[in-house]
């Protein structure tokens, strides 16, 4: 176990709940540390249900293509905890991370606190001590009481599509969830809003009026559409005719559009060439990622495709299903799913997106997750969604079962349902994020 993993294990004993939304504890620690959050580079703050990480990946690639240096804070990680902290383009070292966590732990003085709060305090320490032009800061959960919501004057506040997820923490209606997300909006700071449902948009507009945050909303202040396989973006600053995003799927056109809108609203004058270069360089693992090599890929039938996606709610599943339908139009293949999900997610709602598309679901538990749905529960959800299902104990067993199907055409295999499962896949495959 590394030094930082030892610290995290120790911190887990300080608070009985894994998630407990509050700003009181993070403010106390930041005060003891001398408020490093006030000395970080200019921030773009990103909340939302789906698309946060991809939007940040596009912004990072575009900024770096313009010659800017960028810090990034995202969660959760897939394989290594270090993935959450990118310092001027490079994942934080074990030593630097352990040092920052130790300092934040000492400042906390053994008071009750969540790991995410200590981790966020450590992130602000790291970002305040290393120069960069921009900090891309992702909300951990919700927005209003998230530990990242201590930045008083970001360059821009971004809200990606809001949908039903984390109901036990954020509320059981789209309006309640949207209100939590919209609480990152700040007075006088541009709020960049992705396409939303009418109910979510009404709440976001109401909250923006309360704090006098000027909105830059999709369809009103900026527009993006796909035309002949290219991304066409337009706002008051002009039109961009760009290549298709490197990240696959129609939803990534939308995420790229949000990224462009955020960078422009933030006042970062990027040349057109930076948008063009960034859109084809952006990388975000486990978001409809094609695994072309590795230990698990070698177990698949010859000439098959192995895709990995961490989407874990109904809207996330819908975006992936639409993308796979597009793949099917271009290159038809039988689709089979290997699915593991947490018990807190709507497994049946996720799987209904693939009804009529998937030949079969191979249900598995998520390794090392006490909140994982059983393989039996996942397989029952698949049958309820109208998809034949089998259950297996491991990823390897499920892949072996795919090979025994005896399909005439090499299949298109999607492993999905959870970022935790995606992390296990990348680790077992030997292809962790870099």
Image: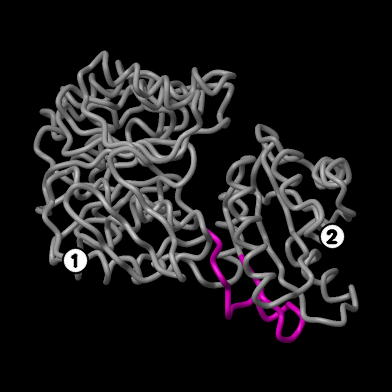
Q: Can you give x and y, in whole percent of width and height, for residue 322 in the image?
A: 63, 56
Please identify the quadrant where the N terminus is shown: bottom left
The quadrant holding residue 25 is top left
With 16 as the anchor, is 56 left or right in this view?
A: left
Highlighted magenta segment, given as a residue range: 287-307
Q: Can you give x and y, in whole percent of width and height, for residue 274 in the image?
A: 20, 67
Q: Which residue is mark 1?
A: 272
With 101 as the anchor, is 18 left or right in this view?
A: right
Q: State the CA–CA distance, disc 1 to disc 2.
A: 45 Å
Do the numbered discs 1 and 2 sit on residues whose CB atoms are within 8 Å? Answer: no
With 372 as the anchor, is 208 left or right in this view?
A: left
Look at discs 1 and 2 and give the one toward the viewer: 1
Q: Nearer the viewer, residue 242 or 343?
A: 242
Element type at mark 1:
helix
Query: Is residue 303 on the magenta stretch?
Result: yes
Which numbered marker is on residue 360?
A: 2
Q: Which color scheme did the rendering employ for the protein?
A: one colour
């Amino acid at each position: 176990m590394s030094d930082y993993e030892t610290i995290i294990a120790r911190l887990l004993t300080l608070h009985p709940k894994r998630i407990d939304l509050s700003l009181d504890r993070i403010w106390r620690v930041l005060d003891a540390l001398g408020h490093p959050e006030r000395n970080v580079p200019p921030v773009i703050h990103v909340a939302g249900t789906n698309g946060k990480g991809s939007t940040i990946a596009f912004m990072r690639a575009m900024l770096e293509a313009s010659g800017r240096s960028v810090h990034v804070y995202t969660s959760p990680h897939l394989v290594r905890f270090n993935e959450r902290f990118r310092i001027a383009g490079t994942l934080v070292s074990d030593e630097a991370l352990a040092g920052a966590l130790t300092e934040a732990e000492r400042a906390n003085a053994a008071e009750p606190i969540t790991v995410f709060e200590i981790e966020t305090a450590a992130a602000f320490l790291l970002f305040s001590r290393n120069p960069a032009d921009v900090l891309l800061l992702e909300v951990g959960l919700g927005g209003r009481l998230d530990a990242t919501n201590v930045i008083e004057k970001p360059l821009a506040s971004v809200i990606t599509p809001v949908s039903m997820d984390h109901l036990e923490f954020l509320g059981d209606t789209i309006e309640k969830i949207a209100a939590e997300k919209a609480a990152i909006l700040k007075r006088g700071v541009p709020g960049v809003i992705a396409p939303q449902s009418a109910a979510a948009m009404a709440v976001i507009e109401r909250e923006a009026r309360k704090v006098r945050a000027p909105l830059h909303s999709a369809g009103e202040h900026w527009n993006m559409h796909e035309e002949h396989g290219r991304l066409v973006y337009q706002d008051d600053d002009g039109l961009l005719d760009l290549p298709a995003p490197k990240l696959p799927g129609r939803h990534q056109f939308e995420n790229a559009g949000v990224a462009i809108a955020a960078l422009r609203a933030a006042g970062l004058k990027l040349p057109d060439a930076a948008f063009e270069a960034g859109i084809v360089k952006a990388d975000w693992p486990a978001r409809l990622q094609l695994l072309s090599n590795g230990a698990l890929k070698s177990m698949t039938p010859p000439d098959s495709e192995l895709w990995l996606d961490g989407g874990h709610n109904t809207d996330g599943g819908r975006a992936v299903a639409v993308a796979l339908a597009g793949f099917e139009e271009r290159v038809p293949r039988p689709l089979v799913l290997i699915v593991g999900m947490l018990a807190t997610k709507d497994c049946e709602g996720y799987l209904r997106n693939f009804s009529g598309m998937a030949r079969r679901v191979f249900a598995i538990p998520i390794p090392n997750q006490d909140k994982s749905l059983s393989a039996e529960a996942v397989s029952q959800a698949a049958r309820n969604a109208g998809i034949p299902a089998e259950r297996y104990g491991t990823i390897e067993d499920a892949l072996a079962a795919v090979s025994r199907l005896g399909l005439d055409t090499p299949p298109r295999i999607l492993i999905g349902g959870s970022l935790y499962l995606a992390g296990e896949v990348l680790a077992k495959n030997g292809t962790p994020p870099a």
